[in-house]
Structures are given as C-alpha cells and as structure tokens.
Amino acid sequence: MVVAEPRSGRDLVRVLGLIFGLAAVVGGAVGQGILRTPGIIAAAVPSPALILLLWIAGAAIAAINAVPFAELGTSIPQAGGPYVFVRRAFGPTAGIVVGWSDWLNNVSSQAFMSVVVAEFIHRLGWGNGLPVGLLAPAAILLFFALNWTNTRLCGSSQSLGSILKGSALLILVLVLFFVPARHMVAPAGAEATPVVIGLGAIIVGLRAVQNTYDGWNNGIYFCEEMHSPERHIPRALFGGIALVAALYLLINAALLHVLTPQAMAHSTFAAADALGAVLGPWANTLLTVFGVVSVAAILNLNVMFGPRIALAMARDRVLPSGLATVSPGGSPRIALIATTAGAIVLATSGSYEQLIAFNVALGVLGNFFVDLAALRLRRTEPALARPWRAPLYPYSMLMAAGINAILMGALIYEDPVHSLAGTGLAVGIGVFYYAVERIRGVIAPAQT
C-alpha cells in the first residue's frame, strides 16, 4: 500500500514518473523547428553525410551538457531547476541572477509560443476574425486552466502531447520513404553546384542544430515531483535526448530521400516541400495541424515548469512567500497566476520580441552556471549524496562548461546587443533585488 506523503501546503506532490520525464525532454525539444531547420543546415553544408553527422554531433553536445544536470538533479532533487543548483553552490546573488534569467526566459517563451499557436490557427482558417493579440492569450489561459487542476493531470497531458508529436513525425518519415513523389521536388534555382564547405559553414549548421535540440533539460524542473528521482532523472535526460536524436536523424534521412541537399537549401520549409511532392496540397494543412499540436505541447510544458522557478525563489524568500503555496493536487497556483500574468502581458503588448531575441543567451547562461555549480559542489560538499555521478569527472563537466562558454561567446559575437541586453538585464535585476532584500534582512541562507 502506498502511503501519501504529509502535506504542508508548500510541498509539491511526487506523482510523476519516467514516462513524464521522457515526455518533458521530447516535448520540450521537438517542435516546428525540426521541419524548418533542415533547410538552413543544408544551405550551410550541402552534403547528406555532413548533414546527418551534424545532427549526431548535436545529440552528443546535448548529452554532454546533460551530465551536470543529471548529477545535480539526483543529488539535490528540488523544484526550480538551475536556480536551486546555482544558489546551493554560489549563494543568493548568483542564484537570483540565474533564477530571474530562467523565469524571464520562460515567460517570454510562453508569450512567443502562444503567438505561434495563434498564427497556425489562422493558417488553418480558424478564428480569422480574432486578432493574434487575443488568440495568443487565450492559448495561454487554456493551459493555465489545465495546470490549475493538479500535477497528475498536467503530467498526463504532456505525455499525451509528446506521444502525438512523435507519432506524427514517424508517420511523416514513413510517408516520405514509401509514398512515391508525384510533384516537382526541386524548387527553381536549386541546381547542384560544387561547393567548398569550410569551418564557418559547419559552425552555422551546428548552431542551427543546437537551437533545435534546445529544451532537452526541461524535465529537471520536476525532479522534486518524480518518483525515484535518483533513477528516473538520468534515464529521462539521456533517454529523452536519444529519442529526440533518433527522430531528428530519421526525419532528415526521409527528407534527403525526397529532396536533394541543394533543393533543401533553397527551401524555407523543407518538410513542406518534401511532403508536398508526395501528397500535394494536403501537405500544408497537415503540417499546420502538426504545428498547432507541437507548439501547444511545448507551451503546456512551459506553463507547467515556469511557476516552479517562482516557487523555488519564494521558498528562499527571494519572492513573496505566498508564491510557494501549493494546492492539494500539487499545483503552485499563486506562482502559476503570477507567471501566466507576465506571459499574457507580453503576448498582448508585443513587447516580448526583444525578450525572445535574447532567450538563447539566457538559456546558455543558465547552463554555464549549472556546469560551474556542479564543479564547485564537488569541492565544497564532497559528502553530498550523489546517486548518479558524472562519468570521467572532471573532464565531462569541464567539457560541458567549455561548450557553453564557446556558445555564449559566439552569441555575443553574432548579436552583441540582444545577447548582452538579455544577460545584463538578468544580472541587473538579480543584483538590485538581492541588494534591496539584503538591506531588509529577509534573504534566507541557502538550503542544505
């Protein structure tokens, strides 16, 4: 007989399992991007072998990045993600910077994805009389209502959404491989021409691949709510990345079965051109329906984990303590209201666009701090229970930190304004908030 854990009104409920963990990774990473990104990559490296190798390299980089997350998630299984790990390792100031970065990233992502859902709905011919600024908040409110219920139902909905996405992509692969093309495959101007592939082109392609793998770490926000986190967190992270990589390789192989690399390079939507060559006009409608399901599933996941960031900071009195209140079903409802309100404001005002521009930089910043936190805690807390220990320590963690440092440098080099604005805003808010709360004397010491 399973005995319910005591509830204090601030405790999350442990009702999620490995299936949800895998769904969080697959659902967070797999979106509409995989249908568009192959064209960008083929334009950079128009070689089938190199295209597939880049997707394998992207999976390897994601797996290396997951090593510190797996160790910290099993040794500190608390809600809040990177904020909890960084605060434990470096104290309140660094924790607040990362916490605010992560929360801003989540809120702006919700706003952006809700607009994408609204635009896909318009493409289907539904609700064309309603402006995007009204449909987008409605999409957020739909998942707000779902997340208001309880954690078990939300977890099941995310698992279902991820299964639907994966099934749809597998069907796409089968159609492209086994249904003969009936229409023109290569767009005009897509003739094969000899090209020299340099290091710069490979970097451009790899960056696009990495952006498409983003979301692999979303399951870490729920480690406090997962059964046997010491076993399920590593399995969810690495198993989820393996599933995503397998899907991405199959999709690219199927696209290359129908399109030449040159045709893909001249296409802004390679999957639509490939499927259109097989199914004709139906392709656009089917891919648009997939877009609605896919982005909606990611939006649901973001609505679910964003409040966990606020809840973790509220537990440490960085945010008002009321945000740490949890309903009997496990939903952090007050934190959910606050996070949803921020997302709706951005979705309706349109001011979210600049936040979206530096979202990638905020994500890389958080990953880099987690890498450093894992390294530091090995020195400062050697006795900390680590049910899963990073292999090849410290080299695997140093490699993850190096990858994120290089990515951060590349982002700043490519777009210094938005990259520095994003990190600067997060650092500024964190330091200011910490200074004010320290003066008031309300910041609690880091939890041990």
Image: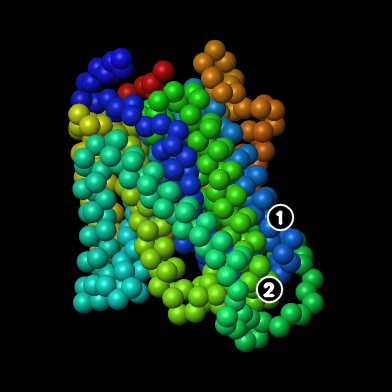
Quarter of the picture containing the N terminus is top left
Distance from Cα at disc 1 to Cα at disc 2:
17 Å
Type of colouring: rainbow
Residue 134 lies, in percent from the top left, at: 22, 66
- Identify the residue at horizontal 73%, vertical 60% (top origin): 50
The residue identified by callout 1 is 53
Picture layout, residue 80 above or below residue 275: above
Picture layout, residue 324 above or below residue 255: above
Residue 113 lies, in percent from the top left, at: 37, 59
Mark 1 residue element: helix
Which amino acid, mark 1?
Answer: Leu
Residue 60 shows in the view: yes
Picture layout, residue 132 above or below residue 431: below
Mark 2 residue element: loop
Which amino acid, mark 2?
Answer: Thr
Please report whichever mark, 1 or 2, sits nearer to the chain's N-terminal start.
1
* 352 or 6, nearer to the observer: 6
Q: Are marks 1 and 2 in contact (CB under 8 Å)?
A: no
Quarter of the picture containing the C terminus is top left
- Identify the residue at horizontal 40%, vertical 25% (top origin): 227
Residue 261 lies, in percent from the top left, at: 68, 71
* 363 or 52, nearer to the observer: 52
The residue identified by callout 2 is 260
